[in-house]
């Protein structure tokens, strides 16, 4: 079984400031980890994913995340926020096992507000 | 390549009715998953279909069902609608079934039950 906790349901930053969205996961098997973004009235778009290999993962729109196994974390960062980054962000985990229970489990989401 | 399409985009139903939502995956994708998104519960997995077979199922009552056709298009059905079924229903498609396959999401169907 797996679960995801996103710390902070709402994060507000100034344009040009660092964006840090926190995600901790729980998984009984080595996980695959994902960050998705959702703009109003739209579906989810994949920002980045960690499967195996390099623990620092770079995604679209300047975002990156680091898988830290010892801390069971997968925090999302962006050095400089842009107004267009305002959206809701979801962290998700799925088991990397070959069994049938590899469904995506999502966190509750973090709404990012960018102030001019 | 066209993305995942969902129809209808918006739907209003009355409690007790049933509803069918449709999802057309990206061309070539054979797996379709469904999710329910509500403010209270967040995003929850409903089920996954691959090659017309249900591969995975979430913790939802039997009122929620789905199917997949030979062309990979999928439908989900909710019978005896309850107010709590009001949600955004998202469909996601992937090339195959399994943890390594990336899921691509559609824009969703917003269902309102009155």
Image (spheres, coloured by chain):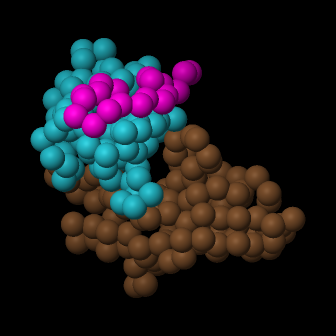
Q: Nearer the viewer, residue B86 or B29?
A: B86
Q: Nearer the viewer, residue A72 or B76?
A: B76
> In the rendered view of the protein, which quadrant contains the C terminus of chain A?
bottom right
Task: Give the residue furthest to the left.
Answer: B62
Whether A110 is drawn above or below B110: the answer is: below
Task: Give the residue furthest to the right.
Answer: A116
Magenta residues, as a range?
B1-21
Residue positioned 51% across, 35% down in the render: B107
Quarter occupied by residue B24: top left
Give coordinates of residue A10: x percent, y percent: 60, 71
Whether A99 is drawn above or below B93: the answer is: below
Q: Is residue A100 magenta?
A: no
Confirm whether residue B95 shows in the render: no
Is A1 displayed left or right of B39 in the figure?
Answer: left
Give coordinates of residue B77: x percent, y percent: 24, 30
Residue positioned 41% across, 73% down in the render: A5
Task: Give the residue furthest to the bottom.
Answer: A70
Is B84 displayed left or right of A24 in the figure?
Answer: left
Confirm whether residue B81 shows in the render: yes
Q: Which chain is cyan?
A: B
Quarter occupied by residue A81: bottom right
> In the rendered view of the protein, which quadrant contains the N terminus of chain A?
bottom left
Residue positioned 54% across, 76% down in the render: A8
Whether A11 is drawn above or below A45: the answer is: below
Residue positioned 15% across, 46% down in the render: B61
Chain A image colour: brown
Give coordinates of residue A17: x percent, y percent: 80, 73
Q: Nearer the viewer, residue A110 or B14?
A: B14
Q: Nearer the viewer, residue B27 or A11?
A: A11
């Amino acid at each position: 079984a797996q679960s995801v906790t996103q710390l902070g349901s709402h994060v507000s930053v100034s344009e040009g400031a660092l964006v840090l969205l926190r995600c901790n996961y729980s998984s009984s098997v080595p996980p695959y980890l994902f960050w998705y973004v959702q703009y109003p009235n739209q579906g989810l778009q994949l920002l980045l994913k960690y499967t195996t290999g390099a623990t620092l993962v770079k995604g679209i729109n300047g975002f990156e995340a680091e898988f830290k196994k010892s801390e069971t974390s997968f925090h999302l960062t962006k050095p400089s926020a842009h107004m267009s980054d305002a959206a809701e962000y979801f962290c998700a985990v799925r088991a990397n096992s070959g069994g049938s229970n590899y469904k995506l489990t999502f966190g509750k989401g973090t709404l990012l507000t960018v102030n001019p | 390549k066209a993305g995942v399409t969902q129809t209808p985009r918006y739907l209003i139903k009355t409690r007790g009715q049933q509803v069918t939502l449709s999802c057309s995956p990206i061309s070539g994708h054979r797996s379709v998953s469904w999710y329910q998104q509500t403010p209270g519960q967040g995003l929850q997995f409903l089920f996954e279909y691959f090659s017309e077979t249900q591969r995975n199922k979430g913790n939802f009552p039997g009122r929620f069902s789905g199917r997949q056709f030979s062309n990979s298009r999928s439908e989900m059905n909710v019978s005896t609608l309850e107010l709590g079924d009001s949600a955004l229903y998202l469909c996601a498609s992937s090339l195959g079934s399994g943890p390594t396959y990336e899921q691509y999401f559609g824009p969703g169907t917003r269902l309102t039950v009155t």
